Amino acid sequence: MTADEELDATGLLCPLPVLKARKRLQSMASGQVLALLATDPAAVVDVPHFCTEAGHELVAQTDSAAGQRYFIRKG
């Protein structure tokens, strides 16, 4: 999957990955996709919840050695 912008939130703990994603999404156009890379174990719960509450779509979620990658389409 391709993204319009990427955000590296590795090493950051809750709630910083979601707060940084929210800030980045504010500057993006509706329909654009943000790729968020996070290592925080709580992000597995926090990111989907944030998307639901904020009206964004969690398009995909993958795991890798570097952490979890979330693809968020701005609502």
Image (cartoon, helix red, strand yellow):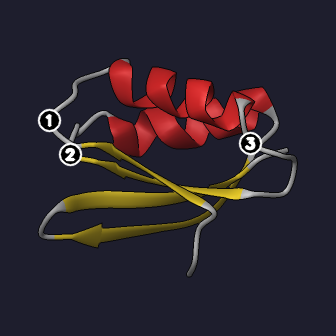
Quarter of the image holding residue 3?
bottom right
Q: Which residue is mark 3?
A: 28
Q: Amino acid at mark 1?
A: Gly
Q: Is residue 19 above or below residue 32?
A: above
Give the CA distance from mark 2 to mark 1.
6 Å
Where in the figure is residue 57, as x and y percent of width and height? 74, 52
Q: CA distance from mark 1 to mark 3?
A: 24 Å
Residue shown at the point (73%, 27%) measured from the top left: 53
- Image quadrant containing the C terminus: top right
The N terminus sits in image quarter: bottom right
- The residue labelled by disc 1 is 11
Question: For this view, does 54 lie left or right of residue 46?
Answer: right
The residue lying at 46 percent from left, 26 percent from top is 20
Judge the density around disc 3: few (<14), some (14-19), many (≥20) Cα neighbours within 10 Å.
some
* Label 2 CA crowd tier, 10 Å (few <14, some 14–19, many 20+): many
Q: Amino acid at mark 3?
A: Met
- Mark identifier at residue 39: 2
- Under tag 3, what secondary structure? loop
- Residue type, numbered disc 2: Thr
Mark 3 or mark 2: which comes first in sequence?
Answer: 3
User: Residue 44: image x %, image y %?
Assistant: 38, 45
- Mark 2 touches mark 1? (CB < 8 Å): yes
**Residue located 22% across and 24% down the image:** 13
Instruction: Give the vertical position of 22 relative to 57 (above or below).
Output: above
- Label 3 and label 2: CA atoms lie apart by 23 Å
Judged by depth in the image, the label closer to the viewer, 2 or 1, is 1
In the image, taking residue 38 as reference, residue 57 lies left or right, namely right
Left or right side of 63 for 30: right
